[in-house]
Image (cartoon, rainbow, N blue to C red):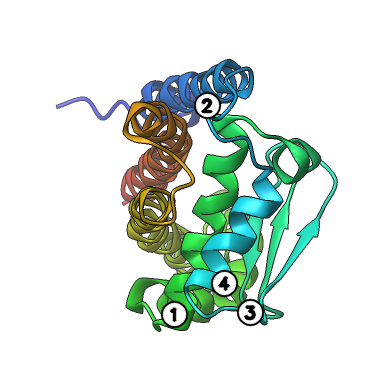
Amino acid sequence: MMNFFSGPMGWYTSILLVIPAMLLAMYAQIKVSSTFNRYLQTPLRNPMTGEAAARRILDANGLYHVKIRQVPGKLSDHYDPRNQTVNLSPEVFSGTSVSSVSVACHECGHAIQHKEAYGPLALRSLLVPVTNFASGLAIPLFLIGLFVGIQGLEIIGILFFACAVFFQCVTLPVEFNASSRAIAQMEMTGIIGSEEKGAAQKVLSAAALTYVASMLVSLMELLRLVMLARSRE
């Protein structure tokens, strides 16, 4: 049987594995941007900024020490467990829309996870330095091994890349759980009403899709590396 991943064209043929996942990733980016911008024009029934909403949720959960900071960039929002800060982009920090408040509360979901020692978040934090190291070396080591003919380097490159894929797999439950916590907290603290819940869920679901797409791209890339390595045997 012909092996389509061997020979001079093998590298290019293997790209076909990744294309569907890459298209999904592109769609996810467009989806999150369009959904965020759509509900950025939808004000809350009881207007409050993303910063105020975040402060309400943090205080309601006894996280008085967690600071809220404004950081540059668009959709650059994140929770930093190292210094326990909720970092919000300008549109989210000062915005009074469904999008702004939903994203701000999502980041508070991570802060609550941290307080409760949520397992997947703790695991992801432990994996960060390992993943940063491994992901930077994975492709260079694999390529050197592939073109020089050193199988050991190919295997190390694949294992390093697998670390990055595992990190993204761990990230999925962390993000979905933070969104669930955000919706529950927004309702419990009176930030949103029942008529606004659906819009908030759409914003957070669109954001979660980007993590799913990113994981699939990496998974297909890992499969591609494995098949290229096996084609040399």
Amino acid type of the residue that numbered disc 2 sits on in the rendered structure: Val
Q: Which residue is mark 2?
A: 32
**Mark 2, other Cα within 10 Å: few <14 / some 14–19 / many ≥20:** many
Tell me residue 49's x, y (percent): 69, 43
Q: Nearer the viewer, mark 4 or mark 1?
A: 4
Q: Earlier in the sequence, mark 3 or mark 1?
A: 3
Q: Earlier in the sequence, mark 2 or mark 1?
A: 2
Q: Nearer the viewer, mark 4 or mark 2?
A: 4
Return the residue nearer the eye: 230 or 56. Answer: 56
Q: Which residue is mark 1?
A: 122
Q: Which residue is mark 3?
A: 64
Return the residue nearer the eye: 67 or 216. Answer: 67
Tell me residue 192's x, y (percent): 44, 40
Q: Is the Cβ of the residue at disc 3 closer than 8 Å to that at disc 4?
A: yes
Amino acid type of the residue that numbered disc 4 sits on in the rendered structure: Asp
Distance CA(mark 2)–CA(mark 3): 31 Å
Which numbered dot is residue 59? 4
Residue at (36% x, 72% y) in the render:
120
Residue at (67% x, 53% y) in the render:
52
In the rendered view, would you say 87 is above or below 224? Answer: below
Amino acid type of the residue that numbered disc 3 sits on in the rendered structure: Tyr
Q: Is the Cβ of the residue at disc 3 closer than 8 Å to that at disc 1?
A: no
**SS at badge 4:** helix
Res. 84 visible in picture: yes
Res. 141 visible in picture: no
